[in-house]
Amino acid sequence: MPSVDGMTTAVVPSPAVATHRGIFRQLLTDSAYVIVGFPLAIAGFVASLVGLVLSAGLIVTGIGLPVMAGALLLARFFADLERLAIGPVLRVPRVRPQYRTAEPGAGLFRRVLAIIGDSQSWLDAVHALVKFVLSMFSFVVTVTWWAGAIGGLTYWTYDWAIPRSPDEVDLNTLLGLGSGTGPRLLLNTAIGVFFLLSLPIVVRGVALLQASFSKGMLTGVAEMRNQITTLEGQRRAAVSAEATALRKLERDIHDGPQQRLVRLAMDLGRAQQQFDSDPDAARRTIEEALTQTRETLDELRSLSRGIAPPILVDRGLPSALAALAGRGVIPIDLAVDPALGTAGGRLDPAVESAAYFVVAESLTNVAKHSRAEVCRIAVTREGKDLRVEISDDGEGGAHVSKGHGLAGLADRVHAAGGKLTVTSPPGGPTLIQATLPV
């Protein structure tokens, strides 16, 4: 760090230098993957081929199945090494499939059958056999390009040591470049420059070819199972969220509008009986019934806002959240990306509904339980995600355990493919973060 006027400044590499370093690091990573992977591919090919052929010949003797299981376990070992190696090349995390295993306490025969009956074990064996061919091709191309680049650029250091007879006709003479050291040096240097410039592209190509094949064979089944598990989890979360919402709606209707409607019916019946004997009392009863009707309508409107408020459908998420904030019982600082309310920035209705539900339910919990004095809401779009944050300065203690108000909120977010995080230590503050894919 050089010092200027007594101040220490950091030297930051330029973008071009950083790019060149990244290319060089990736070149070394790809080259190491191909070169080191070739002897491993030979070992995996030999182990798998010999083991499977030997087990096929010994199948009638009764020991063929254990030998076959051993060959598949060896293929699994080399497959695990390959899963580790392809991560830096493809820039993806390691994914290991869940292999089939025998139940605890099972005998040797059942454990052997569990290995033989696992589909991924056979994919590992096929990968070991086919990868040998790809690895041999990748190895030859990589070594050739490295040798061409290094040999061409350093030709001047060993040209003098190459034995030549007096009557030898070299490549320079055939190409019309003349004879002597100068033309030879120029030609070989040009060849070295060509190999050097194309080295990152060529090595990257063969490494991607080999690694992509390995990824498809060794992690494809696991990724498919993970996707199925994720979809099943989202489906269960959607069912749970819907059931929770229905139970809450039924409870709210029973405790609110239904009770008011029962009282309204009783008041109207009493007014009907009072018309002849006491018109003034009947008038007062009807006035009370009208008040009950207005209050019931207000409660029904409030309940409908938690399902699908018209303002959300008509004017978009910013306007709907502004209406929510305007009805808050404490001061609410609202910051919403205004583009989300424009025609070109509107999100999928399911995403808008989920985001609205997150804010509405969070504000309900703030009003009922937090004892907060101020609340802040921020809704922004970050790339392919919609980020919703609700924070307050209340007493904390909020969580998403079953039986609490935020449990249905977590299910709703998970059903939309998102993630909900609640940070609420005792004493506060509380921060609710929801990330929804758009």
Image (cartoon, rainbow, N blue to C red):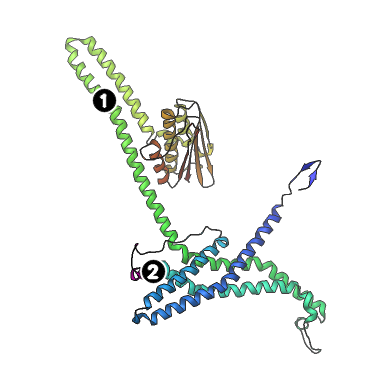
Amino acid under label 1? Leu
Residue drawn at point x = 26 percent, y = 25 percent = 261
Amino acid under label 2? Ile
Q: Which numbered tag is attached to residue 115?
A: 2
Give the quarter of the image for residue 242. Answer: top left
Do the numbered discs 1 and 2 sit on residues whose CB atoms are within 8 Å?
A: no
Secondary-structure class at tag 2: helix
Q: Is residue 133 visible?
A: no
Q: Is residue 417 visible?
A: yes
- x, y percentage for residue 189? 76, 73
Residue indicated by mark 1: 261
Residue drawn at point x = 68 percent, y = 55 percent = 18
Single out the mark in the foreground, 1 or 2.
2
Total numbered labels: 2
Mark 1 or mark 2, earlier in chain: 2
Q: Which of 184/110 is in front?
A: 110
Query: In the picture shown, does residue 54 fall above or below 297?
Result: below
User: In this picture, which residue range is highlighted in magenta?
Assistant: 103-113
Residue drawn at point x = 17 percent, y = 10 percent = 277
Q: Which of 254/282 is in front?
A: 254
Label 1 to label 2: alpha-carbon separation = 66 Å
Q: Does the magenta portion include 108?
A: yes
Give the quarter of the image for residue 366. Answer: top left
- x, y percentage for residue 228? 39, 56
Query: In the picture shown, does residue 353 fall above or below 281?
Result: below
Query: In the picture shown, does residue 226 fall above or below 416?
Result: below
Query: In the picture shown, does residue 71 fall above or below 257?
Result: below
- x, y percentage for residue 91? 56, 59
- Badge 1 crowding class, 10 Å Cα cut-off, few under 14, some 14 to 19, many 20 or more, is some
